[in-house]
Image (cartoon, rainbow, N blue to C red):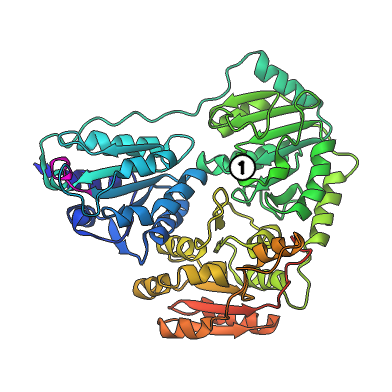
Amino acid sequence: MTNAADIIARRLYDAGCRTAFGIPGGEVLTLIDGLTRAGIDFILCKHENAGGFMAEGTHHVTGAPAILVATIGPGVANAVNVVANAEQDRVPLIFLTGCVDPAEAMTYTHQVFDHGAVLRPIVKASLTAPDGAIAETIDKAVSIAMDPPFGPVHIDLPIAVAASVQERADVPRRASIQPAAPVEGESIEAARRGLAAAERPLMIAGLEVLTQGAEATVERFARDFSIPVITTYKAKGVLPESDPLALGGAGLSPVADTHLMGLIDASDLIVLAGYDPIEMRTGWRGRWDPSEKTVVEFTATQNRHFMHQATTTFVGDIGAGLNALGAGVTPRRTWSNGAPAASRQALAESFRIDEDWGPAAICDEVRKALPADGIATVDSGAHRILLSQVWTCDQPRTLLQSTGLCTMGCALPLAAGAKLAAPDRAAVAFTGDAGLEMVLGELATLRELKLPVIVVVFVDASLALIELKQRKSGLKNVGVDYGATDFAAVADALGGVGINVDNRGDLANAMQAALGRDTFTIIAAQLPRGAYDDRI
């Protein structure tokens, strides 16, 4: 005999979960108790939105589903942004919420609204845990969240059900699914003929490569067939960016696109490996015509976005699909005109890191200081677009960000979750001053957890990306500037260490000192206005 909360907790523990995040309320106390007794640490954060990003940070390190816990009403409402982010960024988030019992809800209205109705547009499923079928409910939730494409699943747990004794705690789980390769036939044979004949092949790899664990296969395939690789921001590092075949990340920078679109236009074969265009700006819509060149797509789910089309689409396992495509095909020399190498050099020239001081210099100094296995996170804003071009990743999942929803306030909690799951790896969060001001309370969470996360703030007292767009549009300066915050003083007040820097030498010294501390550090890097002009 055991209660529903215990069953939920044990099943999540068996799924690999070791940490849950959130803010308790009376409706989830039994659930939190069950999580704790099952061996899943409950981490108190200062806002549910940040808690969801912390949970995502742990997922990127462990591969297990992320867990966010919220109480009834305002707790659920606070989490809507991060749940939407999980849907767009393909994060398997289990969102556990408390609710009043159905009979009580008939007449009791305080804090009560229909959680499922609010969340259904942004989750893969919203379930209410029924008395007598708790194990089935949580197993179904984990299964749905981890099925391609990954995404959030909501479970509403009524107060009485959480504490109710369950007679059936153990039921068979679903058998593991084996990777599905393309069926042998004319479609895969035609794709192989296209690969065998291609003189200018190109690969675009996206976030589904990560969710399906196909990083090693992508790297091997690219090298076997000498195929240059463009990645989305989320997929940076699936091919080490020190490799001559790596063309870096793409997504939001028109400057980078000027060098990459020419390669796409010149290619005679495009291999789309787990490429989800949810990460891309509108300039990538309909970029290629599959009637004019061979476009072979390997994807987790059917293309319903219509942002691009392919000659042939194979829905299934990305790694198995690439292995099937290359089977029996003899590699040949590619790109005899040297265009990819020229584009790689042009990108380096456009995104120079040898400036005396500026946003690229900040990225360069931190990159040089951070260990190879260090984890960086970056918030949304102008700094993120620049950093995604100049920051080199030689391993996947070492640069974390919100790429589908592009939401602000994610970098600090993502870094906190990653550091919590991988305490032996350095973690640095890059954020704009506006993004940090959204989540200042989570600095106290870093203090309480004794997490030595390094927070690098690009300080220009402006919403730099929006101000730049506003100015280029000839509009008046409205709603994009604000007073400067002394972030170093804030760090000191909240139990960390704060440092102001305005040159490379001081930044390098600050990074070395921060890497040796046992508390968090804020490095406030001062920048002039217009620092991103003509840079992104």
Q: How many marks?
A: 1
Left or right? Give the position of 485 relative to 13.
right
* Disc 1 crowd, CA 10 A, few/some/many (<14, 14-19, 20+): many
Location of the C terminus by quadrant is bottom right
Q: Residue at x 23, y 53 (%)?
A: 35
Q: Residue at x 67, y 73 (%)?
A: 362
Left or right? Give the position of 437 relative to 73.
right
The image position of residue 349, as x and y in percent, is: 83, 61
Left or right? Give the position of 369 relative to 531.
left
Q: Residue at x 42, y 73 (%)?
A: 443
Q: Is residue 383 visible?
A: yes
Q: Is residue 211 above or below residue 309?
A: below
The residue that mark 1 highlights is: 206
Q: Is residue 37 visible?
A: no
Closest to the observer: 420 or 53? Answer: 53
**In the rendered image, which quarter is residue 70 located in?**
bottom left
The image position of residue 398, as x and y in percent, is: 56, 57
Q: Residue at x 52, y 81 (%)?
A: 487
Query: Which segment did they paint magenta?
Result: 99-105
**In the rendered image, which quarter is residue 512 located in?**
bottom right
Location of the N terminus by quadrant is top left
Q: Residue furthest top?
A: 186
Closest to the observer: 382 or 18? Answer: 382
Name the residue type under label 1: Gly
Q: Residue furthest right?
A: 337
